Amino acid sequence: MASRGVNGKFSKLELFEAVPDVAQADRRMRDLRPMGWKIDNYKVNPNLKPDEYLVRELGTRVDLGEAAPKNVRKNITGPKRRRILERDGHMCQVCGIRATQEFPDAPGRTAVLTIGHIIPVNRGGQNVDDNLRVECQRCGDESRDITVDPPTGQQVLAHAVRGNLKDKRMLYGWMQAGRRTPSDIEKVFQEWSRLPHAERLDVMTKLAEQVIKGLESE
């Protein structure tokens, strides 16, 4: 894998030739992720075939004798992984998407669920249930870039009670469902964001004309 470099592809057959035992090959792939390796498969990258992998980023070169970072977390056990998935309803706790669902703004790209840390390991987060949550691969990648710890329950409640009754009812509904339901306007924006650049500009210009006319008539 490392010999292919960034953006290098390798096949499942090549992986099994390097690591003959199937279970061992899969485990070693998982072990590389917390050491900075980013490897796509066809589930997250529609440009790949089912038996292909793509190296997006090289991590610690354990194959060259580099020591694993001290903050590398221990693998989450199978039973704990299943328990967290069951607890979180088998859906991403950030965006609400379920496994194999297609991202609304990324046609052809489907969600793969994993177990992420609310407080990252490199900031003292542990593998305890309260610090674990189900994430899709996209939200997991984004959460790694967050450099501040999550708010407390008291802080969230203080923000939640500031809104009017309509906002509170909407927020409560989202909490019950475990995901935010986009409004009709947000759905239109998602559709607009999927247009080619020239069409986006055309739609935006024509909408601007409608807004200006509306302001003039007020």
Image (cartoon, rainbow, N blue to C red):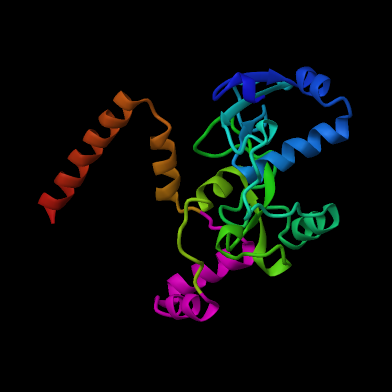
**Toward the viewer: 65 or 182?**
65
Q: Is residue 174 magenta?
A: yes
Q: Splitting the image into 4 quarters, where does residue 101 fall?
A: top right
Q: Is residue 200 above or below residue 151?
A: above
Residue 211 horizontal/vertical position (percent): 20, 46
Q: Is residue 175 above or below residue 63?
A: below
Q: Splitting the image into 4 quarters, where does residue 55 fall?
A: top right
Q: Is residue 80 magenta?
A: no
Residue 200 horizontal/vertical position (percent): 32, 31
At 41% from the left and 42% from the top, the residue drawn is: 188
Horizontal arrangement in the rendering, residue 169 relative to residue 70 (left or right): left
Q: Is residue 22 above or below residue 92?
A: above
At 51% from the left and 67% from the top, the residue drawn is: 150
Residue 213 horizontal/vertical position (percent): 15, 45
At 62% from the left and 55% from the top, the residue drawn is: 71
At 77% from the left and 23% from the top, the residue drawn is: 15
| Residue that sits furthest to the left in the current view | 216
The magenta segment is 152-181
**Toward the viewer: 195 or 69?**
69
